[in-house]
Image: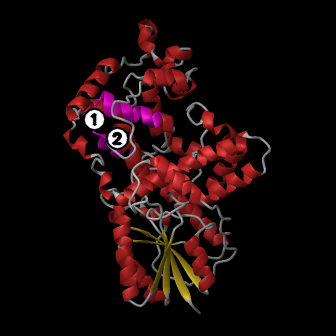
Amino acid sequence: MSVALVWFRRDLRVADHPALSAAIKTYDRVLPVYIHAPDEESPWRSGAASRWWLHHSLSALDADLRKRGAALHVRCGDSLAILRALVKEIGADAVYWNRLYEPASIARDTKIKASLRDDGIEAHSFNAALLFDPWEIATGEDGPYKVFTPFWRKARARLDPRPPLPAPRRIEAPRANGGIAIDALGLLPRIPWDRGFRDVWQPGESGAQKKLRRFRDDAVGEYPRSRDIPGEEGTSRLSPHLHFGEISPMQIVWSLEEAAHGHASAKRPQGSESYIRELGWREFSHHLLFHFPKTTDENLNPKFERFAWARTSSAQIERWQNGVTGIPIVDAGMRELWTTGWMHNRVRMLVASFLTKNLRQHWLVGARWFWDTLVDADLANNTQGWQWTAGTGADAAPYFRIFNPVTQGERFDPDGDYVRRFVPELKKFRGKSIHQPWLDPELQKTSGYPPPMIDLAESRARALDAYQACK
């Protein structure tokens, strides 16, 4: 009987899984394998929040596979060495996997594919994480895009949604020795800082599908408006499920467009298209990372090599991380991040602007903190998001665009619902006053909430002066 391995990485699902589908179609028996090799992702090894999610996602995948007659074979160590050993042990003829696009993963996978083929083993990789491989969309001069709008115009015109591949009903798997338990990977925290995570997330393919159905049926129609309101459930919250491959972007597009075509209201198509465009930003981020891999640690715009970032201030950074800056919506965002492992996208821009503009700390300080604390810590999105806000990246917000967190809070959290949820010290403030508690010093004093750590107007002026000198 013919045998193949399917090497799972961040494609932790069984439906719309090109590598699994192709292997089952071609071979009699298929062994699902996960190899834990965090050092192979250096220097951007998964952070603590991502490891929490990975543990639960692997457990959910293993349960799904067992329902179909197989189990997830887990190993820890050098990926190539383990794949070679498993190929020899079970007599496999091929190894199938879905592609990853981070610089370290590309280098590793290229070496593994060549080595397996040199061994006489078939090695096949597929796109399961993106609507387009990063090299598929190019400018008229056959180069990479640096501006989102023309990139998405071309990509959207080429996007032809297809029905998702069905999950296999049955997987005939060979027996393999040497596997370890998922618990043995040591992914969970030793102290229970993850209580808030458990209240809001269900890692795994089933959880991803529930999130998609809720968004499609209840929220997408209002998405163009509600996506900017952090106090509402107006976004999909699918980002961690996408990052770990528990759902594919094609599944989302297909589901939304199917619903849109069958809906009488004009709101549904508009909301669907607005959300699909946000998936386009995810595509653009991977496009940029593929073509400009050094941007994980370096400014894409070289003129910012001359920018006068402020001297690193551990005290200021710690107050920002802990959500005690004295700026309510900034603190709410940072506390939401610590409590749930996630932050609303509008607020991500505000806290990033505060760090890189008002405090003038290097964007890498924020990128590394997000990397450790976000359950959806995606290298392409994290890099693009921070460089965009800092003004150092492709199609970035101009550096002189400095978000005012007070007016932003008043506009997008007018009743203070979001701030009050995560900064309970301010629960006695009402309406827009919650965004400027210092205007009521007596009430603020009794609340225990700190005064602003920095003057917003003065820090903005200093940032603009530094930018003028850089220019």
Which residue: 55% across, 22% down?
416
Asked if residue 274 can be seen in this view, the reply is yes
Asked if residue 378 can be seen in this view, the reply is no
- Expressed as whole percent of the image width and height from the top left, the position of residue 75 reads 43, 72
Which SS class for mark 2?
Answer: helix
- Expressed as whole percent of the image width and height from the top left, the position of residue 340 reads 51, 41
Which residue: 27% across, 39% down?
362
Q: Which residue is mark 2?
A: 366
Position of 115 relative to 341 (above/below): below
- Expressed as whole percent of the image width and height from the top left, the position of residue 132 reads 51, 62
* C-beta proximity under 8 Å, tags 2 and 1: yes
Nearest the eye: 453 or 261: 261
Q: Is residue 357 magenta?
A: yes
Residue at the farthest front position: 140
Q: Which amino acid type corresponds to the residue marked 2 in the rendered image?
A: Gly
Q: Which residue is mark 1?
A: 361
